[in-house]
Amino acid sequence: MYCSNSRGGGSSSNSSSSSSKNSNTVVVVVVVVVVVVVVVVVVVVVVVVTVVAVVVVVIVVVVVIVVVVLVVAVVFISVVVVVVVVVVVVITKIDTN
């Protein structure tokens, strides 16, 4: 009877050590999963921020190009109008003289 009691105690001690190993394994798995999730979230955030930054830069560049083209077009049209007016005035003065 004494032997069976000691065996029972041994088996309970074995089960407690194996349960502590299982809990350690669970903790390691949870830590690994949390680290992987955090890394994935950080990578996704960095990629999204980079894409948004690139889109904003492209939009700004396009707007600047459009503004420059419009300014050049307005200056060109103004120069053409001034030249036409000067030519018309010169021609009319020559005709009247």
Image: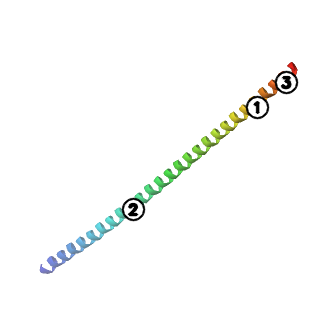
**Residue 3 place in picture, x, y as percent:** 15, 80
Q: Which residue is mark 1?
A: 80
User: CA gap, disc 2 to disc 3?
Assistant: 83 Å
Q: Amino acid at mark 3?
A: Ile
Mark 2 closeness class: few <14, some 14–19, many ≥20 residues within 10 Å: few
Which sits earlier in the primary sequence, circle 3 or circle 1? 1
Q: Which residue is mark 2?
A: 35
Mark 3 closeness class: few <14, some 14–19, many ≥20 residues within 10 Å: few
Mark 1 closeness class: few <14, some 14–19, many ≥20 residues within 10 Å: few
Q: Amino acid at mark 1?
A: Val
Q: Quadrant of residue 87?
A: top right
Q: Amino acid at mark 2?
A: Val
Relative to 17, say whether 96 is above or below: above
User: CA gap, disc 2 to disc 1?
Assistant: 67 Å
Relative to 34, say whether 13 is above or below: below
Residue beneath the point at 28% across and 66% down: 23
Horizontal arrangement in the rendering, residue 6 relative to residue 76 (left or right) = left
